[in-house]
Structure formats: C-alpha cells, structure tokens
Image (cartoon, helix red, strand yellow):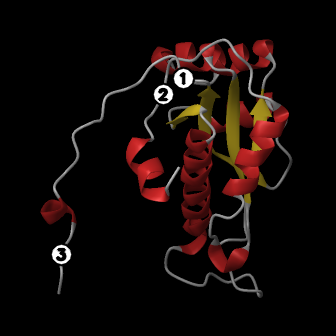
Amino acid sequence: MEALQCIETRRSVRKFKAEAISHEVMGEIVKAASFAPSWKNTQVTRYVVVENPELKSKIANDAVLGFTYNTGTIEKAAALVVVTMIHGRSGFEKDGSYSTSKEDRWEVFDAGIATQTFCLAAHEKGVGSVIMGIFDEDKVAELIELEEGRKVAALIAVGYPDEEPAVPKRKEVEELVRFL
C-alpha cells in the first residue's frame, strides 16, 4: 500500500471480528511504529498489548470514566494496546532542564506520533484500530502493573475490521493552511 493511500484510507474502526492478531503481526506493527520520530531520538514510546479477556474487561468497565461506548469497543477488540511513555526524557537537556517552553509535554507529542504511526502500520497489515483518550490513566496503569517512571498516553483498540467506516467530512485545504 502506498503511503498516501494508507493515510487517506485509514479509519477509526470500532467493530471487530473475533479473530486474534498473531504476535508476529503485532511485532511487525510495533517495529514499523518504532520508526516514528521522537525528541532527540529518545524513543520513549512503549506498548503493552492486553489480550487477556478478563483484564481487557476490567479496563473496559473500571477505567473508561463512565464512557460506555469505549467499554463495548474494548471488550470486542482482539486486543487493547496501552501506549505508554517513559516520563522525563522528551523535552529535557542532559542537565535535567527543559529545552523549550513546552517543558515535558514533548513526551505526549512523541507518543502521539508513535500512536498514529502504529495505527497506519496496523492498517497496512489489515488490522483496524481506534485511538481512545477517555480513560483513567492511573487506573489503567494500576491494572496493567505499569513500570515506575512510565505514564499511559493512549489506548488503542485493535482487531480485524468487521465494518468499513465512511470517510468523515474533511476541512478544505484553504481552511487548514496559511502561507506567508
């Protein structure tokens, strides 16, 4: 699949087939995502793939802040990918000071780039995905026993698509860009 085709055809998928994603395919997706750029090549993004149905259900029911739409999506997904980041590396100088006025928020930027790269790689492999942002970060971290020094950035429900979502309306280029 060509890059522009991949970007233009990737959709948020919320309905999945019951088929599991092999560890080999998931590894290929993570490998592709590892090429996402990051602050001074710090590569702070890490992935926790939750396949265990009981743990997925626990996250779906106890950590989505009452947003039940995400509950069903997570429970029906083949896996839930918890995107995490190593805290305290992106945006810092070697002496520990901030490099820019964005301070430590570069880690979220890096995790976002890696998350989108992950989803594009998944799409190329025929795996659907939806990035979810409504969740209790501390509860998810507790449930997956996240290592100290890491933070949860996003959740991605993944699976083989059982739907073909329509293309959402896009803004016109003229509304998105300004040339000086």
Rendered residue at 18%/62% (across/down):
173
Q: Secondary structure at mark 2?
A: loop
Disc 2 vs disc 3: Cβ atoms closer than 8 Å?
A: no
Disc 3 vs disc 1: Cβ atoms closer than 8 Å?
A: no
Is 171 placed left or right of 108 in the picture?
A: left
| Marker disc for residue 178 | 3
Rendered residue at 21%/69% (across/down):
177
Residue named by callout 2: 13
81 over 163 or under it: above or below: below
Comes first in the chain, label 3 or label 1: 1
- Kind of residue at disc 2: Val
Rendered residue at 51%/38% (across/down):
133
Comes first in the chain, label 2 or label 1: 2
Disc 2 vs disc 1: Cβ atoms closer than 8 Å?
A: yes
Rendered residue at 86%/46% (across/down):
147
- Kind of residue at disc 3: Arg
Foreground mark, 2 or 3?
2
| Marker disc for residue 172 | none
| Marker disc for residue 161 | 1
Number of marks in the rendered image: 3
Comes first in the chain, label 2 or label 3: 2
Please rate how many residues cluster around mark 1, counting C-alpha atoms within 10 Å: few if below 14, some from 14 to 19, many from 20.
many
Q: Secondary structure at mark 1?
A: loop
Question: Is residue 81 something that shows in the picture?
Answer: yes
Is 165 placed left or right of 72 in the picture?
A: left
